[in-house]
Image (cartoon, helix red, strand yellow):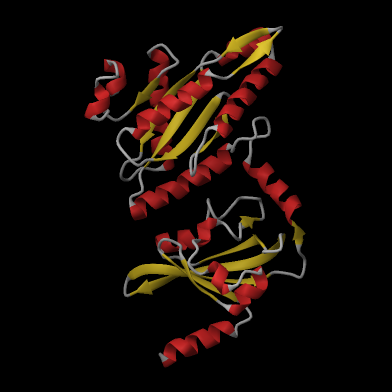
Amino acid sequence: MKQTSLFKAILNNMDDGVYYVDLERRISLWNHAAEKITGYTSQEMVGHFCHDNLLCHIDLEGHPLCTVGCPLYASMGDGTPRQAEVLLRHKNGYRVPVTVKAVPVYSGDVVVGAVEIFRTKSAVIYEDRFVDAIAEKAMSDPLTGLPNRTYLESYLEYKLQQFARFGNPFCVLFADIDNFNLFNNHFGHNTGDAILQSIAQNISANLHGTEKMGRWGGEEFLGIFDLHDDAEPYAIAERIRSLFAHSGATYNGTHLAVTASVGLSVVKANDTAESIVARADTLMYKSKVRGKNCVTLDIAPPDGLAATLDGDEKNE
């Protein structure tokens, strides 16, 4: 008890902010300097997860570190300390530049959590809306407003780390607009852009919770979805296919309908970002071969769903 009191007294008299998280990134310690630097009291932070995003860390290039590229999470994963220059969001709504150091905490030979130590880099503060605009530009596709490939690649690495550590299953969906070159060639690139924007609006309005989907490049879209039961991949794939089918554009008063071919792959042990995306991409091309405007998955449907699917859709 005396050692614990001494430990807390030392932490609370440091000039550096310090907080501790367990393997789930739940905060259980938040010292006085952390309160002063961020504006959040210990009572407001302890018990929250750092990925609840109260501080909304971004790096100097605008990448949101609380959901992708978190140095604290990475240090727990490989046991290696890390240092970074980031901007945190103060409780009062402005950005504070800080230097952070993430250090894994061990019990014996096992990592049980991590400590982040941070200090203000300068007296300069940044207007939050300006910084958020930079972050949004860095991680968003300018035409559609959806997450761009940079964001999706970072988020996929984060989901793979979660899967490796906690076994949280997810899937990657790859969708490609059918015959998109015909729209551009026959109706012009403005019409092609309008189709992409229509699809993006439908996607943005119909994603839930942690679901992420963005523009991978050209007419290709990639989605990353958490899974909770065996039937869910089929529901996700069909929902996204339907969103494309309900998109389109108007040309000289005529509605131009659009469809997409979809491939979906469920994460496997030892997957990398490259391997799971490649599988989903291959499955999407199988949908093209099958006639387009359909979905192809790499898992067999559960028994209750098998009777509702044709032979090709059961398993590829």
Residue 156 picture location, percent across and down: 47, 43
> Left or right: 204 with respect to 294?
right
- Relative to the observer, which residue lies in front, 305 or 311? 305
* Residue 248: quarter of image: top right
Q: Quarter holding the C terminus?
A: top left
Q: Which residue: 45% across, 62% down?
A: 25
Compared with residue 11, is residue 286 higher up or lower down, i.e. above or below?
A: above
- Relative to the observer, which residue lies in front, 74 or 144? 144
> Left or right: 315 with respect to 132?
left
> Left or right: 123 with respect to 73?
right
Q: Which residue: 41% across, 47% down?
A: 160
- Relative to the observer, which residue lies in front, 234 or 14? 234
Compared with residue 84, is residue 163 higher up or lower down, i.e. above or below?
A: above
Q: Which residue: 57% across, 55% down?
A: 65
Q: Which residue: 63% across, 56% down?
A: 59
> Left or right: 313 with respect to 115?
left
Residue 149 picture location, percent across and down: 56, 37
Q: Quarter holding the N terminus?
A: bottom left
Q: Farthest residue toward the bottom? A: 2
Compared with residue 112, is residue 214 higher up or lower down, i.e. above or below?
A: above
Residue 307 picture location, percent across and down: 24, 20
Residue 315 picture location, percent across and down: 28, 24
* Residue 39: quarter of image: bottom right
Exactly how many numbered labels are in the figure? 0
